[in-house]
Image (cartoon, rainbow, N blue to C red):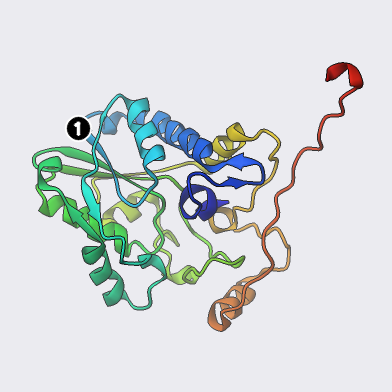
Amino acid sequence: MHFEFVYLARPDSVIDGTSVYESRLHMGEQLGRKIRAIPGAQDIDVVIPIRIPAGLALQLANTLGLTYREGFVKNRYVGRTFIMPGQAMRQKSVRQKLNPIGMEFAGKVVLLVDDSIVRGTTSREIVQMARDAGARKVYFASASPPVRHPNVYGIDMPNQQELVATGRTEADIAREIGADLLIYQDLDALKMAVRAANPALVEFESSCFDGKYITGDITPITCRISRSSGTRAVASTIRRKPPTRRSSDDR
């Protein structure tokens, strides 16, 4: 559920009968509602997306009644940094991938919105780039809940020890990436957002957030073997409500 709906899938994709674009609009609204209820997040000047699909961040800004700006120029020829080998390469690639537009940061309290935080390498570099561009405060919002467990169903992710959320609170993670405030999307809110686009969806594969692997045969040892060998378990499945029977009078 995570990377497909939040990040990997094209906005015009339809997954299991669910519009990815519509689900992302609901995600932005859910995250915006959470931020609006946080007393310490009421001084935001501008919402700036990072790598996240524009629809989600724009809907978040609309929910908050704030200005939305494209503060980073993306180099489309640099690949996804979270799967790159080596810390030095990931840090270098972040600087090559994104270039800040100074006028959007100078003297402002900025809310950076990203799809997720995995190792924290990319987030840390981007927060520092925002500060270097003149931001007065840097808040960071993740459209996903904390990634605390490895995904073994087809996404090349680091092992649990490399995940920045492992053994850390949200305040710890904020300090780790250098943000003044960190806001994560709640898992229930994420599920609610996708379900709002398709009420027939009942259960989701969300193991990287809650550690519950739907195949029932994944253990810490399995995760380590899967990571080291490059193999992956079977693809996840999503259970749906049975269709409602209709009589000929309902046509």
At 86% across and 25% down in the image, what residue appears?
Answer: 246
x, y (%) of residue 31? 42, 36
Residue topped by disc 1: 45
Q: Nearer the viewer, residue 20 or 48?
A: 20
Q: Residue furthest right?
A: 248
The answer to whether residue 60 is left or right of residue 186 is left
Q: Nearer the viewer, residue 20 or 187?
A: 20
x, y (%) of residue 88? 26, 76
**Kind of residue at badge 1:** Asp
At 89% across and 16% down in the image, what residue appears?
Answer: 249
Residue 160 visible in image: yes
x, y (%) of residue 110? 21, 40
The answer to whether residue 49 is left or right of residue 243 is left
Secondary structure, mark 1, is loop
Q: Nearer the viewer, residue 247 or 177?
A: 247
> What is the count of numbered marks?
1
The answer to whether residue 21 is left or right of residue 94 is right
Placement of 10 over or under 166, stated as above or below: above
x, y (%) of residue 194? 57, 39
Q: Residues within 10 Å of mark 1 (few under 14, many from 20)?
A: some
